[in-house]
Image: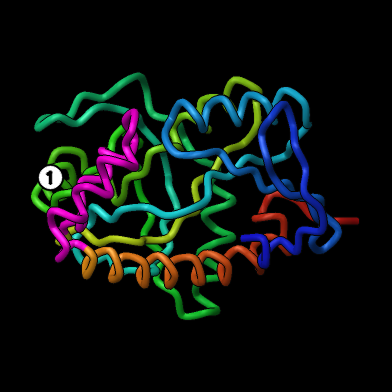
């Protein structure tokens, strides 16, 4: 993303780290929100309280729910909804409608590049869905194309400030794929110690982690490639006079 937006300096806003730059005459701020809805909401509140914005975008990786979606496919949300999944899906609050013009901008760029775009509802959860059977269950229950952990939290803050909101992410793991570890362990106190312990107990997980590393690299390259031309046109929202 830093390469796509051509950032030129590091910034810090109320303890939130990010980068600032200009691209095609527009100013962009790339903010590192951290993992999970609480961290994302806190970062979004800090930045959007201090800085005027024409658009807020939740960018990063997503887990595919839609069958047939491949690593590197671009996810553009039509709406985002938060909820909890513990064997059954419980929605929390209403859905957040995403900016239609951003979807058009991304789809135009993707067509020119020969990139696949998956468009539809995105789920935001406070935990990582690690098993393929659970991802497939969520798809049948909700019809959502993908899931992440931060988009709904960022969208709610943007909505409260009257700022258009969009989700542009790339697939790092697919619907029929089990993740190599239960990554929720890392989100708990002493999580890294327990996670490393899990890898020691199950060394075969290192093969899966290496596969996921390569998939994440491919997803990052695709996100950079698609966001560059979209940023040059203001993601469809504005033109520079």
- Residue 224, placed above or below residue 159: below
Residue 109 visible in rendering = yes
User: Residue 77 or 203: which is nearer the viewer?
Assistant: 203
Q: Position of residue 25 (x, y in %)?
A: 86, 59
The residue shown at (46%, 35%) is: 97
Position of residue 148 in the picture relative to residue 206 (left or right) = right
Asked whether residue 123 is in view, the answer is no
Question: Which quarter of the rendering shows the C terminus?
Answer: bottom right
Q: Nearer the viewer, residue 51 or 39?
A: 39
Q: Position of residue 209 (x, y in %)?
A: 28, 63
Is-magenta flag for residue 215? no
Provide the secondary structure element on which disc 1 rests.
Answer: helix
Prevailing SS of the magenta stretch:
helix
Task: Give the residue at mark 1.
Answer: 134
Residue range of the region highlighted in magenta in the rendering: 178-205
Q: In the image, is 119 to the left or to the right of 183?
A: right
């Amino acid at each position: 993303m830093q390469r796509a937006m051509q950032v030129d300096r590091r910034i810090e806003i109320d303890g939130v780290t990010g980068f600032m730059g200009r691209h095609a005459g527009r100013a962009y701020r790339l903010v590192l929100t951290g993992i999970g809805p609480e961290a994302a909401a806190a970062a979004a509140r800090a930045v959007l309280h201090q800085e005027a914005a024409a658009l807020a975008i939740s960018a990063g990786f997503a887990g595919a729910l839609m069958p047939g979606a491949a690593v590197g496919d671009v996810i553009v949300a039509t709406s985002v909804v938060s909820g909890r999944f513990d064997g059954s899906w419980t929605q929390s609050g209403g859905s957040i409608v995403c900016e239609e013009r951003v979807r058009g901008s991304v789809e135009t760029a993707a067509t020119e590049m020969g990139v696949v775009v998956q468009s539809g509802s995105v789920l935001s959860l406070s935990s990582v869905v690690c098993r393929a059977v659970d991802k497939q269950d969520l798809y049948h229950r909700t019809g959502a194309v993908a899931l992440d952990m931060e988009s709904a939290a960022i969208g709610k803050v943007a909505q409260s400030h009257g700022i258009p909101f969009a989700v542009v992410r790339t697939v790092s793991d697919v619907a029929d794929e089990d993740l190599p570890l239960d990554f929720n362990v890392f989100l708990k106190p002493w999580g890294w110690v327990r996670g490393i312990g899990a890898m020691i107990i199950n060394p075969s997980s290192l093969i899966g982690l290496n596969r996921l590393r390569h998939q994440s690299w491919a997803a990052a390259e695709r996100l950079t490639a698609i966001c560059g031309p979209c940023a040059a046109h203001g993601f469809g929202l504005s033109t520079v006079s």
